[in-house]
Every structure is written in structure tokens, then in C-alpha cells.
Image (spheres, grey):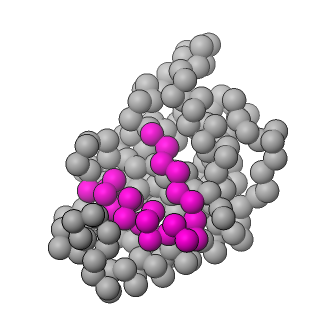
Amino acid sequence: MKQVAVLVGSLRRESINRKFADSVARLAADRLRFVFSEIGDLPLYNEDLWENPPEPVLRMKRELAAADGVLFVTPEYNRYFSPAIKNAIDWGTRPWGDNSWEAKPAAIIGTSPGALGTGAAQNSLKALLTVCDMVLMGQPEVYFVYKPELFDAAGDVADEKTRAFLNRWIDRFTLWVELTSEARTDAQAGP
């Protein structure tokens, strides 16, 4: 089973994007192994910190090295993706010559209570991911409008249409990761 590093761009405890990501992970459990990579403890990117790299940065880079693909789950802040995701991406591209994102199959999802979901945030993130050499799945897209009644008390998707929609997306993402991920070696285990 392919392993996917999941980066959730909302850091708050009651994040609907974290809840959404957890729900999608449970739906995908028979097809993909989702491993959540904590990004809230990463310091703001500062090139000087590579003199003595912070452990959270090294941990994230190890998690990315172990992953066959990456899933970004982003909220929308002022029509843009979250600064936490940008910070994680910056750390992952460095030091020079050690780009953790290189050739990784990737996808973006997100949710918001607003009518457009996180469409603007996802569209702005797409440009950055391709510059960082990720192999981005373009379709299908998930601009999910969060409604609590779509989920049960355990956070599982309760609505049948929503479950069918998300399962179709998971099937496509699973295929994307299988078709585009490169074989890993022990040498790629990261720092």
C-alpha cells in the first residue's frame, strides 16, 4: 500500500480542514496509508538555521522521504493558501540539492464553510507545487463546502453522495500515486 504524507495547513485545534483530512484518511484506509506530517512546529524559514537544523524540519524531511506521495489540505486565508503550508514547502526545498518534494505525486484538497470551498487557495497553491517539482494531479478537484451535517459524531462521512464523491477522488489519487511515484531506496531515507 502506498504511503501519503498529509500536510494540513490549518493549525488550530478545531480545524475543519483537519477534521476533513481525518475523514478522507479513514475513507482511503483500504487504498492508501495516510501519515500526517506536523507542520505547526516548524520555525519560520531562515537559511541561517541550516547551520544547526531544527529537529522538526529534519523530521518532516524524513517523513517526506518515506512517502510515495503528498496531500496538501489547505484552508483559504484571504483567497490564498495558508502561510503554514508555504513555510513547510520552503523548508522542504532546502538545503540546495535536497528538495524533498522532487518528483513526488501530489494533490490538493481543502474545505471551507464558504460557497467556493477553498478554490482560490488551491489554485494559487498549484503554481507553487509545480515550481517545486511535484507531479500534481490536476483533476478531479475537491473544493469542498464544509457542512457539519455531512459527518457523523465520530467525524466519518455520513452523507452517501459525499462519500461517493470522495471515494471517486480517492480512487483517482490512489491511481495517480501508483502511476507517478518513483521507487524509493534506503539512500532516499532523508536526513
Is residue 138 shown to the viewer in this render?
no
Quarter of the image holding residue 187? Answer: top right
Is residue 35 covered in magenta? Answer: yes
- Left or right of 190 in this view: 143: left
Could you say where residue 99 lies in the image, as x and y percent from the top left? 67, 40
Q: Is residue 183 left or right of residue 122?
A: right
Indicate left or right for 114 with 48 as reference.
Answer: left
The picture places residue 53, in percent across and down from the top left corner, at 58, 19
Quarter containing the C terminus: top right
Residue found at x 27% / y 63%:
154
Q: Classify 51 as above or below 3.
A: above
Q: Quadrant of the N terminus?
A: bottom right
Q: Is residue 161 visible?
A: yes
Considering depth in this image, is 64 or 82 the residue closer to the camera? 64
Picture residue at 44% right of the left edge, 71% below the top: 27
For the point 77% across and 41% down, the residue is: 188
Range covered by the magenta-colored residues:
16-38
Residue 128: percent from the left, percent from the top?
51, 51
Above-or-below relation of 191 to 154: above
Does 40 appear above or below 68?
Answer: above
Q: Where is residue 95 in the image (x, y as percent from the top left)?
A: 65, 28
